[in-house]
Structure formats: C-alpha cells, structure tokens
Image (tube, rainbow, N blue to C red):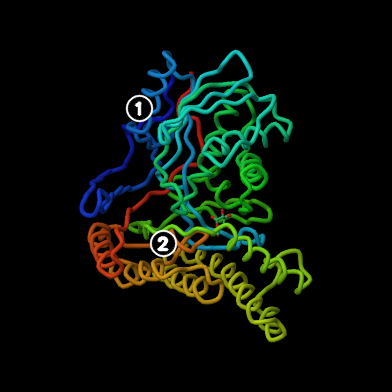
Amino acid sequence: MKVRAYPAFSLSLIAAFRVFAGRSGCGILVSWNFFCHANSENAEGETLERIDLNDYDRVVGAFERRFGRAPRWVVRAPGRVNLIGEHTDYNDGFVLPLAIDRAVWLALAPRGDRRVEVFSLDFDRPAAFDLDDPVKEGHDWDEYVKGTAWSLIQAGFRLAGWEGVAWGNVPVGAGLSSSAALELATARAFAAAGSLAWDPATMARLAQRAENHWVGVNCGIMDQLISAAGRAGCALLIDCRSLDCVPVAFPPGVAVAVLDTSTRRGLVDSLYNERRQQCEAAARWFDVPALRDVDRATFDRRAGELDETTRRRARHVVTENARTLAAVDALRQGDAGAVGELLGESHRSLRDDFEVSSPALDAMVRHAAAHQACYGARMTGAGFGGCAVALIDAAESRAFVDAVSAGYQDETGLVPAVYVCSAADGAEVVEHG
Ligand code: GLA
C-alpha cells in the first residue's frame, strides 16, 4: 500500500484549539489553522500535500474494525466557502470559491459483486444498495451516494461494487457544501474502484445532476465544481458557462475566515428556487440566454422598464459578476483592501437587492467588518442563515476570531463557530494499493 500524501514536509503550522463553553452542552468552537501554503515542494520536486492524519486514521481504523481488512483506497473531497460571486452560478456567471480544509473522507475496498455498502460514522448508520437497481428511499445522507451512482450509470460509466466507511468534518447545513463533498467523495470512490477516467468538470456536472434530479435540490454548479477541482493555496475563478477554472492565489499574509452564525433556516430550497425563477424571468425579459449576458450599461439603460423586484434581482447578478472579476484583478495585484471593499458591496447587494441575508448574517458581517484585522466580509452561500466569510490579516487571526465571536455572541445570544481556513485541493485519492 502506498501513501501518496504525507504532512511531514508541509510548511503548515497548525494550531488548533477548542474552547467549549456555555450553554446546554454547546459552546464556542474556535479553531485556527495557520498555513503558509498548503502545497510545497521537496528536494525531488515532488508535490507534497497536507493531509490531516487524524482524519485519515479515523476512516482507515473504522474500516478495519468494520470489515476486518485494510481499505484499498482512501479518498477525500472538500467542502467550500465562496469568497465572492453569489447567486451567479445558475445565471451562467462567475464565482470565486475555495475548497476548504474540511472534507468528507471515504475508505473503501472492492467487492466481488455489484453492491455498495457504506457505513457513515457521522450518522452511525449503514446503507446498502444494488448498482443494477438503485432506488430512492427518502432524504437521508445515503441518497447522495446512491444519486451519484445513478448519475454516473446514466452517463454510461460502468461501475464496480465496493464497501466503505464515510466520515466528514464539513458542518452539515451550514452552507459549506457538505452534500457536494459527499457526492464528490462518492464519485472519486467509484472512479477508483472502477478505474474510471477522472475529469473534474465532468464529475462535477454528474454530481450536480444527482443533486438536481435524485436528491431534488435545484443547485447550480459551483459547489460540486470547487469540490472536484479546488487548488491548494488558491481560490478558483469559475466561469459557470464554460466551466473554465482559473486558480487565483491569495496575497501573502492574507487569510480567509469562515464565520458560522449558528442559524439554519428552513424553506431555503423554495426561497432559492424563487430567486432562480426571478433571474430566469429577467433573462427572458432581456431576451438573452442568462443574466450573464446583460452588461451594466444595458442594465442601466433599461432598468426603468422593469418591475421593482425583477430590477433588484437582475441588478444584483449583473453587479456581482462585475465585482467577482474585479476581485480577481485585485487579488492578482495583491490589493486585499480592494477585495475587502468588493466583499462589503456584495453583502449589501445580497441584503438589499437579492434579499437573501438575515439579521444574524448582517450582525456577523458587521462585527467582522468592524475589526481592524478585517479587509471585508459578507454572507456566503445560498443565504438566509449559515455562514459569512471574511478576508483578514493572517497575523491577527487570533484577535479577530476572539473579538468577533464575543461581539456576535453578546449581541445575538447565539454561539458562533469562527475558524480561519486554508484553501485545499479538490477531490483526490489519498491512498491506493
Ligand atoms: C448554493 C447552491 C450554489 C449557489 C449558491 C449561491 O450553495 O448550491 O449552486 O447557487 O447557493 O451562490
């Protein structure tokens, strides 16, 4: 058995600590991962990746206990946070997410038949299905596994059976794409077990198809594509029409903080679908395939003819696409201050024009943006609850995390989870025999 990735030579300096305090068993979970860069090169020029051996050991140990043998492969696929470019993916626009150092892991070995058996450590529950007849049974975690198998089969891939153990540390329901991570880990597992060609964009499309048509969530392509194609140390500028991905490095000394408000909102799917429909209606009104095709000048010229709601929704998408491209330019110039300004504008546009923020997200963004270490902050993901994202001075991460956590908790009475994350690689086989 060959381990492809070791943390030993990583430049990573990892400091993590947890403070559990407070109310009814929950508490502040604060962790710091300070990274110089997630990728480095050793003397032989081999790329060394950072893998957290605790995560790796957990799934391997659980696999060995459950199946009495060693796994043949260990795969992981990350969650994501979106820096800017929100609600633009299903408008064929631009997004700038990064894969984060939280992932879904799968340890697996081949079976002699056409069954898949997976045990989830998170849900403490087994699931099994037949590759010749996957059946949708409910809304549990295993539907993401089954749906991905179904989608690969529909696309003509010949799948092989396997048994495995799954574990993840992407918080569920927080807007960090735990479901896309599970779909891409599953796709990576099938690719390993069946010797399938791995093309990140193709696999992302098929995972999105599983989410749209099997799970029944009408998401865009961003979450699956960043989980498939993420690049360590970089955000990815994704053109959601062509699916071209361009890595954009962070300026030295700049870190990304994820700020979980601890709020989760029901009905997100229907509100999300409503926004999609409003955008599609606006594109039809402009007589273009998608709002991506409306530039600012055209919008300004014709905005007065639109009804109020359509005008606001379209204005958000048109301006957000422009902000995303401007943020890429600013990052390339090392101008974190300019990126921060754009994050602030994005938040106001999502709050006032697209109307997908919430009082908790607004409070979190206010506390983050007011801190001197912060270049800018905004809500991230679908909205209505979940997480904000901030660009901060890495040297002051600790003070930022402490102050923003305390300020938010004082104001709202809610216990947040704030962590500084590093940009990770996309879905990969970590070990193969
Ligand atoms: C969710 C969806 C994505 C994207 C974002 C909003 O995360 O899954 O496709 O639309 O919301 O940017």
List the residue tagged with mark 1. 57
Q: Which residue is rendered at x = 58% and y = 39% of the image?
A: 138
x, y percent for residue 243:
65, 51
Residue that appears at 56% across and 42% down: 139
Amino acid type, callout 1:
Asp
| Residue 16 quadrant | top left
List the residue tagged with mark 2. Answer: 388
Image position of 351 with respect to 106: above or below? below
Image location (x, y in percent) of residue 231: 49, 45
* Closest to the observer, 244 or 174: 174
Q: Which amino acid does label 2 sit on?
A: Ala
Q: Between marks 1 and 2, how big is the CA–CA gap?
A: 31 Å
- Viewer-side residue, 200 vs 141: 141
Ligand 1 lies under 8 Å from the Cβ of mark 2? no
Q: In this view, does 168 lie above or below 358?
A: above
- The residue under the point 38% across, 68% down is 365
Number of residues whose C-alpha sits closer than 10 Å to that of mark 1, classed few (under 14), some (14–19) or many (20 or more): few
Task: Point out the image quarter for the N terminus.
Answer: top left
- Helix, strand, or loop for circle 2? strand
Image-based side of 22 in relation to 112, left or right: left
Quarter, ligand 1: bottom right
Comes first in the chain, label 1 or label 2: 1
Q: How many marks?
A: 2
Q: Specify whether residue 30 is in view.
A: no
Whether residue 23 sits left or right of residue 92 in the image: it is left
